Image (cartoon, grey):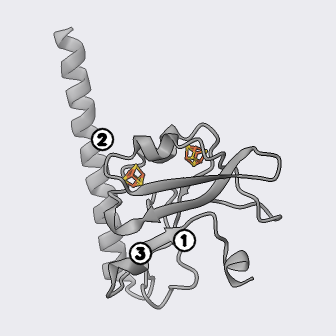
Amino acid sequence: MKKQACCAYLSKVVMGFISLLRGMGVTIGYFFSPKKIVTQQYPENRESLQMMARFRGHVSMPHNEKGEHFCTACGICEKTCPNGTISVLATKDLSGRKVLGKYIYRFSQCTLCNLCIESCPFGAIVMGKDFEFAVYDREELIFTLNQTQENANG
Ligand code: SF4
Ligand code: SF4
């Protein structure tokens, strides 16, 4: 057992050293050829900037090409959220079936913990990749996620 722990420790030391050398390689490479850009040129690359796969911008609700979402208004995410960031306002359709009326998301309260997304049984919400949300009034950070740009304008 002691030998295993020792091997794991040594392996971490070696990996750390390799990682350090990789980083130094980038720095030294830039020193000799400074024209080769190795960092994100933000904000000049704002239009083409791709955020990392695990980046957590804010909670968002994807819609398909017909403008439909997958939320059933079950309210699990609302109950899971530790700080009341989400309000799921259900309503009924013409056949009396419970459907989503409004999905309110208060971004200024959200800690981006991801619990709501993990709890959703239907994959109806995801972490968006948008950024640059600086505003003067926090009221502007209250979003209705089931309202797409098209139906908001229409
Ligand atoms: S987003 Fe998911 S968990 Fe939240 S109300 Fe809709 S279906 Fe339920
Ligand atoms: S990410 Fe966390 S804080 Fe934000 S709405 Fe989801 S559960 Fe709440």
Cβ of mark 3 under 8 Å from ligand 2: the answer is no
User: Neighbour class for label 3 at 10 Å: few (<14), some, many (≥20)?
Assistant: some
Mark 1: secondary structure: loop
| Point 59% across, 61% down: residue | 102
| Marks 2 & 1, CB-CB < 8 Å contact | no
Q: Earlier in the sequence, mark 3 or mark 1?
A: 1
User: Neighbour class for label 2 at 10 Å: few (<14), some, many (≥20)?
Assistant: few
Where does label 1 land, which residue? 50
Considering only vertical position in the picture, is 14 above or below 105?
above
Indicate the amino acid at tag 3: Leu
- Most extreme residue toward the top, as rendered? 1
Among the 4 quarters of the image, the one containing residue 34: bottom left
Q: Which mark is residue 65?
A: none
Q: List x then y, in percent, for residue 41.
A: 43, 85
| Point 67% across, 79% down: residue | 152
Can residue 91 be seen by looking at this rendering? yes
Q: CA distance from mark 3 to mark 2?
A: 42 Å
